[in-house]
Image (spheres, helix red, strand yellow):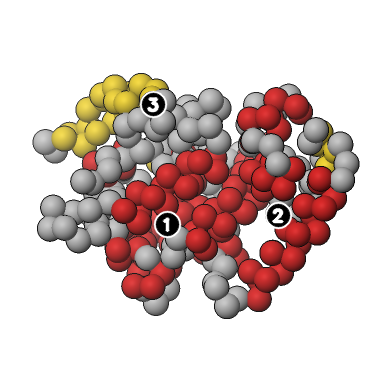
Amino acid sequence: MIEHTRSSRHQQKTNGYKVNGKQLAAVIGTSLVVMPIAGSISPLSVQANEVEQQGAVSQQAFIDSIGYSAASVASANDLYASVMIAQALLESSYGTSGLAAAPNYNLFGVKGSYNGQTVYMPTSEYLNGEWVTMTEPFRSYPSYADSFQDHANVLRTTLASSGDYHYSGVWKSNTTSYADATAALAGRYATDPNYSNKLNWLIATYNLTAYDWGTTDSSVTEQSTVGQSSATSVSSGQSYTVVSGDTLWGIAEKAGISVDQLMSLNGISAELITVGQVLQVA
């Protein structure tokens, strides 16, 4: 059975974009997001540049907040974290879409129900040669970590009518690079002919391959060692200071509590944390 996603039938049109910044206007997820464009683009260039810089910072902060969860899930499931993160950015408008925000945390537009939890949202679908707005059921998750894990399950277990795994072309073991994986998603996960190009642009722009841990990659050992030392500091005190690479999911796991408990303890409504932030963990 093929899992339905919002983008399995829908990706809105995007006008031409160039990696080095001459032109870019991407329709991502459920809203229009204009990514930073190099050079002067309006008479109010100072104000425009400030807005672009703020946008770039918030986009990177969102990537930082989900990176560890993506890397952990991808590494355990023979997938590219870079591709998963790029899909999350594309499908959720950098986490700003209504579906991706609390309390739904659905980063990939997966339809249906998750542990009995469903939210109904309007979405644009490309049917019979035209865009139409429909209200559809989407999965609602307790956290971004759950969204990543469920997405991995979709990519690993979805069967095609032939009985073959529908997304086997995305698996690391069946590819030579992330570009093979993004190419395999085009026409399967999304009908948008530019889907793979958009994912490749995001991966290159934000250096997302840094999250592609390999089973023999030294970064895995390094991350594991860091995790062990951090776990000691978390469990031995009532608070924890956020360091680079931390996520709420990772901190909650080390502290032996749920993400929801950690968010409740600290009055957090979204999974965005900053380096140096002190969190209550007990």
**Quadrant of the drawing holding the C terminus:** top right
Residue 17, position as x, y percentages in the image: 42, 54
- The residue to which callout 3 is attached is 116
Q: Image point 46% across, 35% down: which residue?
A: 106
Closer to us: mark 1 or mark 3? 3
Measured Cα–Cα span from mark 1 to mark 2: 22 Å
- The residue to which callout 2 is attached is 245
Left or right: where 125 falls relative to 141: left
Q: Amino acid at mark 3?
A: Gly
Do we see residue 202 in this rendering? no
Residue 148, position as x, y percentages in the image: 48, 47
For marks 1 and 3, the one nearer the N-term is 3
Q: Which mark is residue 199?
A: 1
Residue 221, position as x, y percentages in the image: 68, 71
Do we see residue 257 in this rendering? yes
Closer to us: mark 3 or mark 2? 3
- Find numbered disc 2 in the image and state the secondary structure of the residue it sits on: loop
Are the residues at dot 3 and dot 2 in contact (C-beta closer than 8 Å)?
no
Are the residues at dot 1 and dot 2 in contact (C-beta closer than 8 Å)?
no
Of residues 20 and 54, the one drawn nearer to the viewer in this rendering: 54
Q: Is residue 272 above or below residue 178?
A: above
Tell me if mark 2 has few (under 14), some (14-19) or many (20+) residues whose alpha carbon lies within 10 angstroms of its own. Answer: some
- Find numbered disc 3 in the image and state the secondary structure of the residue it sits on: loop
Q: How many numbered dots are placed on residues in this image?
A: 3
Q: Amino acid at mark 2?
A: Gly
